[in-house]
Image (tube, grey):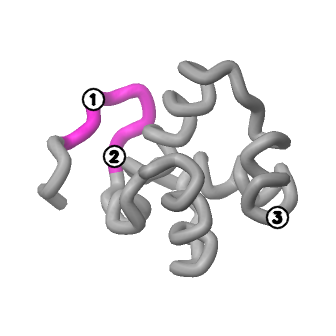
Amino acid sequence: MMATRGGVRLRAWLKERRRTQEWIAEQIGTHQTNISAWMRGRPISVDAAVRIERVTGIPVADWTVKVERGGSLPPTGTA
């Protein structure tokens, strides 16, 4: 399973702010296992992506862009 740009960006966002998956899960009303799965590339609902965007600013559209794990991110605005 490929990661998504949203998942890669969320991982970086959490690391930069020294926050955990548990923290973001609590903020958006879900379980940490969902956060982990979404960060690894499991499909995310639009509702969950919107809730993450409200907290982090990571655009909903980023969850639809697939990226290689460990690779560089494609520029914003490209698929």
Q: Nearer the viewer, mark 3 or mark 2?
A: 3
Depth check, front residue: 69 or 57: 57
Q: Position of residue 7 (x, y in %)?
A: 51, 47
* Label 2 close to label 1 by CB (< 8 Å): yes
Residue at the front extreme of this rendering:
54
Instruction: For label 2, count other residues whose C-alpha is less than 10 Å away and answer few (under 14), some (14-19) or many (20+).
Output: many
Residue under pointer 2 = 67
Question: Mark 1: which secondary structure?
Answer: loop
As drawn, the label of residue 30 is: 3
Residue tagged by mark 1?
72
Looking at the rendered structure, the kind of residue marked 2 is: Val
In the rendered view, does 75 fall on the left or right side of 27? Answer: left
Residue 32 position (above or below residue 19): below
Which amino acid is tagged 1?
Ser
Viewer-proximal residue among 11 and 56: 56
Q: Is 28 inside the magenta-drawn segment?
A: no
Disc 3 element: loop
Earlier-in-chain disc, 1 versus 3: 3
Q: Position of residue 20 (x, y in %)?
A: 76, 32
Query: Sequence order check: which comes first, mark 2 or mark 1?
Result: 2
Question: From what the image shows, is residue 24 above or below residue 30?
Answer: above
Left or right: 34 as drawn, with respect to 63? right
- The span picked out in magenta is 67-74
